[in-house]
Amino acid sequence: MFQKVHLRLTLLCTGITAVIMIIMSLCYLYVSESGLHRNQFQAFRNDINTISTNLEHQTVISMEWLSKMEAQGNYLFFVLDNGTPFLFNQLNNPDENAMRERLLAESRDAFLNQSDTETSVQTSNPDNVFSDLTHSEYEFISPSMGTRYFAGNITMGNEGSLLEIIVLSSLLNLENQIQEQRLRFLMIDMAAVVLLGIFSWFFTGWLLKPIIDNQKKQALFIASASHELRTPLSVILSAAECCKTAPPERRENFLKTITLEGMRVSSLVSDMLTLSQSDTHRFTVQKKPVELDTLLMNSYEAFVPLAQDKSISLSVELPEDALPPCNADPERISQVISILLHNAVSYTPNHGRIALSLTMHRDKFRISVTDNGIGISDEDKKKIFDRFYRAEKSRSAKEHFGLGLSIAYEIVKAHGGSITVTDAKDGGSCFTVVL
Ligand code: ADP
């Protein structure tokens, strides 16, 4: 299921980012291409202006001047006298001649049909044989060549005769430049989409990891809970079944078993509810100023009988000076101390020792429960706060489900404190809660 979600999220992430990137690239290309086009047209206009100014100060238009201009600016020049092309345009190559004639005709057509030409009137020079010099620039597509051209039309009138100079500049170079730029962008965009895909795959995987881990934990929790519930429930069912046929004097025993197992189920269900509340953040901690020494004394007194049953010496050590109150939930902290003391009594053999102590160091309260019991291996120390985890040695204990320390951990965490375990000096374990 998560594999599919992972793939979909990757596609979604890549798709959205790629679309945004492509739109931005297209916008950039549009701005850049229009800028290039505008600049080129402006440069062409400036050239036509210069040519017109040159022409204005010349009395004769020589063929050398035209050839020089053509070679310099990559331009095509056509000179027409009263609409008739000059000799300058008649080249030896008939194909090129035909091409030039076609271009001339097309540019003149475009000039006549063009609405957005830029026309400038140059002041007439009285010394010049030509007067009323005007020039216009426009753009057209040559149908025969399939290429765009900038065209400049310079007209000069003189006593009934009209001299026209048409200057054409092919946009082939600009178009090639634009094509190259588009290709470059296409390749960059394609590479970026691939990189985005790879990045999205890892990024969404990283995002999904806590959800997948959580789902695995939930599944494990349900499996462990079902496993733990199955044993007492099957005992209850079989005891109930036996009750039906058992002689009255033996029924009492079966009923006792049913009650004991029922209590186990009830305690397990209440532990699971506490943990589930913690997972769904419904775990409330009502903090108020608490005198931890009194709280410890109460817990100590509650466990004295249990310790005595196993001839364990239970001691409590409190600071001599009165401590300031600690801001905590007294019910929950009592629950933590009970879990630790209950474990200490359970995992300490008869005639052992358990010490409960409270100290304060730099605004921090430190509650420790130390025993000289079976101890916890380093391997188990990492896992004992996990749900349903029980070290191999304690698996047989019926009243232990492996949830006590995980509940203690959640309570301490909700208080912003910490709970740790270390080896006690004389064997056994030492649990420390810092608040
Ligand atoms: P349980 O209900 O099994 O005690 P806990 O979560 O309280 O569950 O403890 C988890 C495991 O940690 C226990 O099964 C036991 O193996 C180990 N453990 C806890 N406290 C002690 C202790 N004082 N001494 C030795 N082992 C302990």
Image (cartoon, helix red, strand yellow):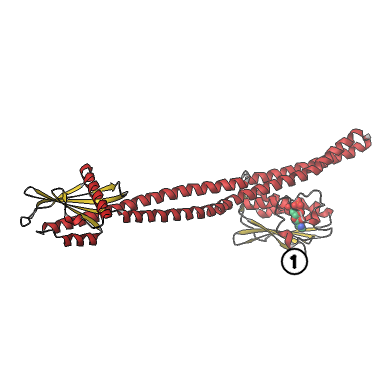
- Residue 165 is left or right of residue 39, and the answer is left
- Residue 227: which quarter of the image? top right
Quadrant, the N terminus: top right
What x and y, as percent, mark residue 428? 77, 62
Q: Nearer the viewer, residue 383 or 325?
A: 383
- Quadrant holding the C terminus: bottom right
Residue found at x 76% / y 41%? 266
- 159 and 382: which one is in front? 159
> At 72% from the left edge and 43% from the top edge, which residue is drawn?
270
Whether residue 91 is situated above or below residue 258 in the rendered picture: below
Picture coordinates of residue 162, whole percent (x, y):
11, 49
Q: Give the image quadrant in which the ligand numbered 1 is located.
A: bottom right
Give the side of residue 9 with respect to residue 32, left or right.
Answer: right
Which residue type carries mark 1?
Lys
**Residue 78, image x and y in percent?**
20, 53
Is the C-beta of the residue carrying label 1 under 8 Å from the nearest atom of ligand 1? no
Q: Where, by quadrant of the figure, is residue 176 drawn?
A: bottom left
- Looking at the image, residue 340 sits to the left or right of residue 45; the answer is right
At a point 53% along the width and 47% down the height, the residue shown is: 11
Which percent across, then down, holds residue 243?
89, 35
User: 10 Å neighbourhood of mark 1: few (<14), some, or many (≥20)?
Assistant: few
Q: Is residue 345 above or below residue 239?
A: below
294 with respect to 37 (left or right): right
Instruction: Name the secondary structure under disc 1.
Output: loop
Residue at the outermost bottom position = 425
Disc 1 marks which residue? 425
